[in-house]
Amino acid sequence: MSTKRRSFEAGHKRKYLVVIDDTEECDRAVYWAAKRAGRTKSAVVMLRVIETGDAGAQWLGVADIMKAEAADAAKAAFKKYSERIKKIAKGVKTDEVIREGATSEQIIKLIDEDQDIGILVLAAAANKDGPGPLVANLSKIAGTFPIPVAIVPGHLSDDDIDASS
């Protein structure tokens, strides 16, 4: 994880990495990343991780069907958020990445592979149950990340984010 960041070198552009999932707070991370990308002339990378399930189900073909359904859901989510990003910040380029495996491992691998990713953007859930599983899990290893991690409070409105980003 000591790969040098290259986002400010000639021929490179800084990217904000956002994990696209089905949580309510995901939109807050996307909105913040799009605003920042627009203001800093950067791009947004949207990552959707398909958690690998029961390998024993493969003998029935169930795993393949589940993966295909998950890939379709990822593409639908990318379409939704790409359109949202275009409305938030004109001209911001988006990249779409689908990975399989454990979410935290795939985030780290992608950051290591793409030297233009400069900031990981997450959003914390706005409920009494805690910040959500992704923020909770990644906060345990955030100190080892090669890039900053921005956590957007899930209760912030678009106006709140506009005023602070």
Image: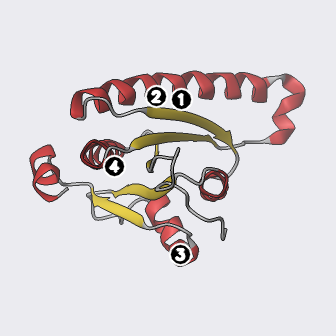
Assess whether mark 1 and mark 4 are in contact (beta carbons under 8 angstroms): no
**Residue named by callout 4:** 29
Real-space CA distance between mark 4 and mark 1, rounded to the nearest whole angstrom: 17 Å
**Residue 111 position in % (x across, y down):** 59, 56
Any part of residue 15 in sight: yes
Horizontally, residue 162 falls left or right of residue 135, namely left
| Closer to us: 155 or 115 | 115
**Can you identify the residue that label 3 sits on?**
140
24 vs 165: above or below: above
Q: Earlier in the sequence, mark 2 or mark 3?
A: 2
Secondary structure, mark 4, is helix
Tags 4 and 3 touching, CB below 8 Å? no
Residue placed furthest toward the front: 10
Looking at numbered disc 1 in the image, what kind of residue is underneath it?
A: Ala
Q: Secondary structure at mark 3?
A: loop
What amino acid is found at the position of numbered circle 2 in the picture?
Answer: Phe
Q: Is residue 124 left or right of residue 18?
A: left
